[in-house]
Every structure is written in structure tokens, then in C-alpha cells.
Amino acid sequence: MVAAALAFYETLHMTFSKHISDMPDTVPWYSRSLDFEQLARDYPPPPDYFRTTATLSRDALHALQETRFLATVQRGWEIPFFQRHWAASGIERGDIRSLDNLTRLPPYDVSHIRDSIERNPPFGDFMGISPADGAHMPMVLQTSGGTTGLPRPMLYAPQDRETMAILGGRRFAMHGVRPGDLVLVTYSLGLGNGGMAPREAIWRYTGAIPVMTGSGANTPTRRQIEIIKAWKINVILGFPSYLRHMALIAKEEMGIDPKSLGIRLLGTHLGMENRELIEDLWGAPAFDMYGTHESGMLAAECQHQTGMHVMEDAFILEMADPETGKILPDGEKGTTYITTLYKYGAPQIRFNVNDISAFHTDTCPCGNTMRRLKRIFGRNDNMIKLRGVNVFPEAIGAAVLEDKRGNGEFFCFVDRVGQAQADHMDVWVEMLCDEQEAPVFKLDLERRMKEVLGVKVQITPVAKGALDQYTGTSSTSKVKRLMDRRA
Ligand SMILES: [Zn+2]
């Protein structure tokens, strides 16, 4: 017995000693990884942001952008992906000397990133950091939503992650989030940045408190509503489809009027969704924002709801003609190119993110001098060709939402039909009206779709909740709207 105990102690002791001997002399502590005060001067969080960066003159902003852009290009030359991509366009070190030279650099898109990952699995060579840098730098890994195959990984260096949190903090402060607010975060918790990035931003830079319920799969929707009520949550973050879903569950299944819950504001990602519909359900203003996992928080609406102020001290956004790549003047719709000015680990330099947007040309009454995006009109890569016509599912969604006989839920099936194998789209739409009204609802919506899309689609009214198995509205924040079954 004693011998056995001794032997056990011996093993334990050896294991413990082994741990110690394996341990390097230092571990990179996050609290020592950055000069936090300097970072806050460079990228002021709220409220300093409103008194400093947000009111810079366009000339002062241009000078700041130029300094940061040239540093970013220098960093780019240390990263194999950019060395290869730029060399292929005949760009040499020293060619880029000012911000005016930006357009000489060739854009790239997600196909180039996938190629980079294939060449150098598993993380690609588009990042200037790798897991081995964990020896001297604390890092975090999050991914793209990943609709097909493995999601695309992104490692964040301390500078990158902390600045993202600051930019997120600005977003929430612009929306009107204030210290002491309780913010329900209904975005997915996991590999994606959905819930993770807002948590860091709210907790570190707003004085408000994130309440991480996650999507309906993390916390059932009824429970989320019980939590809102019991803890007096006053801000909700979520995708428009989930905000609608929550409000309808409260109203119809729990007998609670969402307006009675005391929600002061909603943070969302409107795209082509109908703002008024969500605001009417909750009795609170809904604010738009734009962010991606590669870049962080790019732009957000202030309380005037006049479009999204771009964080122009941290990004340069360009709108390009999707066909020719020509840069378009402010006001015209194009595909968005992103250049990050703050990222060390994985800068983006003219990344064509394939989202369609446009700049406003007027100024905002709030006095913020940063240019504003009108909205995200759609994603180039969601676009499908239907009998030669370009169709965005986002535009279908906007038309579906206009009709109050439906609840805004829809799903598109695309097939080839008949002997001619013609393209055919069938849009299933959840209806709130009576069964006998369905034929008129169908005809009206088909007529409206023809007007909006310029091509005929079929509408199939279905019962409320019938589409959840296709869209995933109740359980995921990555809602699906389309299945293309043309081989
Ligand atoms: Zn404003």
C-alpha cells in the first residue's frame, strides 16, 4: 500500500518536474504585449474618439492615412503572399511612395486567399504571423463563417485584436450604447467572430456589459426573452432575421409585447432589410454596421441613421466597378476594396471583399467628418444568373419584407426545368395571412418580384416556421437564403 502510494507520488512528481522543465523562461502575457495608452492615442476609443479623430479635417485625415498606408505597404513586403502578388504585377519595392499610388497595387479577392492556403496549408502565407509566434506574442484565431469547406482561419496579433475592440467600441458608442447598459449578444459563439468580437468591444471600451446568450442554438429563443425581461436588458445585437424571430416568439408564443420589454436600441447588420419593420416590432431604433472577420469593424451608423461612418483612420475603402476594376467617384455603387491601416498580423491591402456599397456625398448632422456608406446592397458572390439576369437574394428579401402578409422569411430554390432546361427560381415565402388569401398573396408578390428583379420568379406561400429547416433562422446567425440545384 505504502509502496504503491510512493510509486504514484514518484510519477506525479516526475510529471510535474517535466512540466517545469518544458516551460520556457517567459510566456507572452497579454497585459505586457502592448502599450495600451499609446494605442488609445493612436486609435482613440470613445469618448475621446468623438473629440479627436471623428472631427479631423479631410486634409489631416489624408496625412494620417498616408503615414499608416506606407507603413502597411512596408509590412506587406515582409509577407510572401503580397511579395508574390505584387511582383506578378511588376510592382517593385520603393514604387509606392504616397497614398496616390494606392491604385497601382493590384486588388485580390477570396480566391487568392484560398490559393494561398492551398499552397501553404493550413494557414496560408497571407499572414505575417504563424502559431510559432505564440512564443513571444499572445494571439487568437477566429474564422470566416465558412459556408463551404473548412472556414478560413485568421490569426490576430495583440495590436490587431485590441484595435478591433476599440473600433467596435466606437460603433456601439455611435449607436448610443452607454456605460451600465446590458447588451444581449445573439450572434454565434465559436469559431466565427460573430459574438466574440462584440464581447471584447463592449466589455473593454463602452462601460456596458455584454450578455452572451449567442444564437438560438446556444440559448433557446424563449429563454433569451426571459433573460431580457428578468435582467432588464436594454440593448440587443443580432441579425435582422433573428431580431424579427425573437419579437414574433415573444408576441405569439409567450404573450409578451416586445415593446414592453424596455429595449432602448438594436444593433444589427441591415443590408437590404427593412429597418422600420424591426423598429416597429421592438419600439426601438435599429442601427446598421459593416464589419468582416478579416478587417474588423469597418463602419457604423450614428444616432442620425444617415448611413455608416467609416473608421477612416483605420481603413481606406474604395468602390470599384466589378467588371473593370475602375475606381468610382463617391455616390456610385461598386464592389468594395478594403485596405487596413492598423493591422500588423494580416494586413489587407486592396482586398476585394465583394460587397456592393456606395459612399454618401453629403455630410452628417452629427459633425463626424468620416465618409459614410449608404448600405451593403448585396454580395457579388451571392449573385446568381437567372436566364441572363443578375439576381441578388438580398433584393428578393427586401421585396418579401415589403408585404405585410408575410413575416419576411423566404428561401429560394433554383433549378433547371423542362426540355429546354430553363433556369427557374421558386421563392418560398412564409405567410401570416389566412390560407384562402394565399393565391392573391402569391400573385401580388410575383408581380412585385418581376418589377424589382426584372425577371419572373415563382412564389410559393408556406406556413409560418416551415422554412426554418432551410434557413436556420432560429438556430444560427449565418442564415441561408438560397439553394442552387443547377449542376
Ligand atoms: Zn453621423
Image: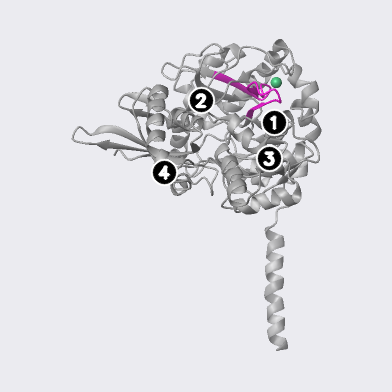
State ligand 1's quadrant. Answer: top right
Q: CA distance from mark 1 to mark 4?
A: 43 Å
Queried on whether the Cβ of the residue with tag 3 lies below 8 angstroms from ligand 1, the answer reads no
Q: CA distance from mark 2 to mark 1?
A: 20 Å
How crowded pointer 4 is (Cα within 10 Å; few <14, some 14-19, many 20+) is rated as few
Image depth: mark 1 or mark 3 in front = 3
Q: Quadrant of the N terminus?
A: bottom right
Query: Is the residue 362 above or below the residue 411 in the image?
Result: above
Ligand 1 lies under 8 Å from the Cβ of mark 1: no
Residue drawn at 65 percent across, 46 percent down: 134
Foreground disc of the pair 4, 2:
4
Q: Which residue is mark 2?
A: 377
Residue ID for mark 1: 171
Q: Nearer the viewer, residue 453 or 255?
A: 255
Residue 155: % across, % down: 60, 41
Residue annotated with mark 3: 259
Q: Single out the mark in the foreground, 2 or 3.
A: 3
Along the polypeptide, which appears first: circle 2 or circle 1? 1
Bounds of the magenta segment: 298-318
Identity of the residue drawn at 71% across and 38% down: 201
Regarding residue 138, the answer to whether it shows in the image is no
Crowding at mark 2 (Cα within 10 Å: few <14, some 14-19, many 20+): many
Q: Amino acid at mark 4?
A: Glu
Q: Which amino acid lies under the numbered mark 3 shown in the image of this protein?
A: Lys
CA–CA distance between discs 4 and 2? Answer: 33 Å
